[in-house]
Every structure is written in C-alpha cells, then in structure tokens.
Amino acid sequence: MYKAKVNGHFEFEIDREKDRLRINGEAADWDMLPLREGRFSILHKGKNYDAEIIERHPAEKSFRIRINNGIYKVRLKDPYDQLLEKMGFQSGAALSVKELKAPMPGLVLDLKVAAGTAVKKGDALLVLEAMKMENVLKAESDATVKEIHIKDGDAVEKNQILLEFE
C-alpha cells in the first residue's frame, strides 16, 4: 500500500493489489484511465478530471500534478518508507545534511550564502576551484546555514568542513 500527501494536508492511501483508494480515511469510488505518458483521466463521484504529471522528483518521491486547472504537490511513501517511519527512522530522502565538506582540495572562489540564510535543495552555496575547474557546490536538502568556516580566497583540504546547517 502506498500513502500520498497532497498539498501537505490531503491523505491518500492507494492499494494497487485491491484497486482501492482512500481519501482522508474514507473509501473513494474512482476509476483512472491512462491517456499517454504522464497524462490520465480520472473519474470520481461522477466527475471527470484531467490529470498530468508536470514535475517528477523520484529521489524525493515527490511530484507536481495538474488536475484540471489546479497544481498539486504530492509526496509518496512506499511500504519501505512506512516501515522505517513506524520503527522511528526517516528514509534517506527525508534526512537533512548537517554540514558541507570539501569534496576535494581547492580554492574558495565565491561564497554565495551567509550565516542565517535559508537554502533549498539545489541552491548554490559556493564555488570551489579545483584542478583548474570551477565547481558549484549545492545544498543537498532544505536547511538554514548555521555557521560558515571559510571565506572567499581560502584554500581548503578534502573533507574540510566548509558550512554547517540547522
């Protein structure tokens, strides 16, 4: 059974083996017809809805879906995620990184954040020159910069802690 949270508050349970759907704990009478890759027609309570997956993030198990004219954020939990949660653990996709270490020796060319800066996964944190190449180091998860251990122009060693996050 899969669980999905839509826009942070609608809860869906999807049991593919029994072809059953529950929305916020209540059984839903529905049918879905795939139209083409990423597009579906959904019939629910006598109404037809056009659905299209407009953005996929498989590593985070999240999607953005357009249903008719509305955009919805969907986060999935597969049986493995649910088991880890039940045992009190977080899945790898939900873990947050507490520090950024230098992946190689190099020279800090451009620090793009300051202490207290809120960053999203994928945001540029700094530019590190190594082996005559500029490497943009990006945030691996959403976080807030807690402490900065380097400044522009610093030479750093491999595995040196560059930034800490909250």
Image (tube, rainbow, N blue to C red):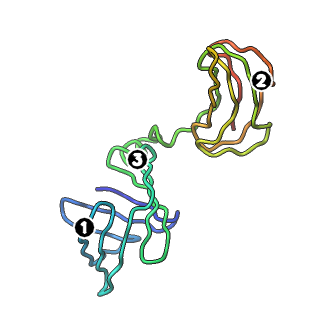
Q: Position of residue 119 (x, y in %)?
A: 68, 44
Q: In which quarter of the image is the C terminus?
A: top right
Which residue carries the number 3 mark? Answer: 58
Q: Which amino acid does label 1 sit on?
A: Pro
Residue 32 appears left or right of 104:
left
Q: Is residue 43 above or below residue 142?
A: below
> Which one is nearer the viewer's eye here, 83 or 9?
9
Q: Is mark 3 on a helix, strand or loop?
A: loop
Residue 122 appears left or right of 93:
right
Q: Position of residue 160 (x, y in %)?
A: 67, 16
> Within the image, what quadrant is residue 76 found in?
bottom left
Q: In this view, does 144 lie above or below 21?
A: above
Q: What residue type is labelled 3?
A: Pro
Q: Position of residue 9 (x, y in %)?
A: 51, 66
Which residue carries the number 1 mark? Answer: 34
If you read the primary sequence from the N terminus, does the residue marked by circle 2 or circle 1 appear first? Answer: 1
Q: Is residue 155 above or below residue 51?
A: above
